[in-house]
Image (cartoon, rainbow, N blue to C red):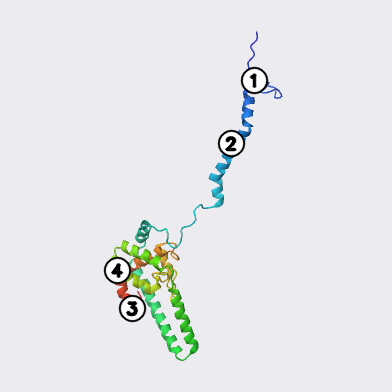
Amino acid sequence: MEYTPDYPDLADHNPWERPPGRVRKTWRFLTHNVTITVVGIVGMLVAMVFVIPKWMGPGEPPKAADGGAFSTNDMLARLSSSSMDPVAAGVIAQAKKNAYEEQQRQLKLLKEKAKRDAKARQQLKMQQERERLAKSNPNASQNKAWGKKMNALKGWGDCWDSLETLWDHESSWDQHATNPSSGAYGIPQALPPDKLADAGPDWKTSSPTQIAWGLSYIKARYHDPCGAWSWWSAHHWY
């Protein structure tokens, strides 16, 4: 008797004949509703994990610019990365001195003119009001809390009263304070303002960044806040 294999060679197989049992079972499995549903769910999960986040952009919002998320380690990092040599501090101090002297000269002229000119008196009043508003800061308590902690991290706990009083006079601890005459900016009243960028890119709004820069400037120029306040008391700028 001639032997006939159970599965003839595929080349001799008639495509219109019913397929073998194993092929039929595989086809029924692949086309079953449950299989299709499972494959669809897996595809959706893959899209949610790998595709949708890329379309939506960054998943985490930026941190608050006011420094509210800064930890002690963050502040130490800012303090250690913000350094200034005496030469650079001297250049800044000279700019602040020139600005103060020019401001006083302009005020003196306005006061003299105000004695004769009602319009000049009004201009003087407006300028004084701008200066008052520039030092108005509803977040002073929070900023002072940052300042006290960072001042202590510098090892200047004994000079906290000096630092508090110094920046009370300079900006009322307002991170947005702008001197209308000189353009000095921020809690330490940096001049020019963009010098604050040495301490961090968020210098326009972040109180810890501004404080780190201010403490660096004080160290390079006056050794500590006690020395800075002593200088300010005699010259009305620092």
Give the residue displayed 31% in from the left and 63% down from the top.
152
Q: In terms of depth relative to the viewer, which is nearer, 77 or 9?
A: 77
Give the mark toward the camera: 1 or 3. 3
Q: Say few, some or many: other residues with alpha carbon within 10 Å of mark 4 (under 14 / 14 to 19 / 20 or more).
A: some
Say left or right for 14 vs 110: right
Q: Amino acid at mark 2?
A: Val
Residue at the (34%, 66%) spot, across then down: 215
Query: Is there a contact, CB below 8 Å, between mark 3 and mark 2?
Result: no
Q: Residues under labels 4 and 2: Cα distance?
A: 69 Å
Q: Which residue is mark 3?
A: 235
Secondary element type, mark 1? loop
Q: Which mark is residue 9?
A: 1
Numbered disc 4: secondary structure: helix
- Residue type at mark 3 is His
- As rendered, which of 10 and 23 lies closer to the eye? 23
Q: CA distance from mark 2 to mark 1?
A: 35 Å
Q: CA distance from mark 4 to mark 1?
A: 96 Å
Q: Nearer the viewer, mark 3 or mark 4?
A: 4
Marks 1 and 2: in contact by CB < 8 Å?
A: no
The tag earlier along the polypeptide, 3 or 4, is 4
Earlier sequence position, callout 4 versus callout 2: 2
Residue 120, compared with residue 206, is above or below; it is below
Viewed as shown, does residue 234 lie left or right of 137? Answer: left
Report the Cα–Cα distance between label 3 and label 4. 19 Å
Which picture quadrant has residue 114? bottom left
Query: Which label number is shown at residue 159?
Result: 4
Q: CA distance from mark 1 to mark 3?
A: 105 Å
Q: Nearer the viewer, mark 2 or mark 1?
A: 2
Residue behind mark 2: 38
**Badge count:** 4
Give the SS element for disc 3. Answer: helix
Mark closer to the chain start, 4 or 1:
1
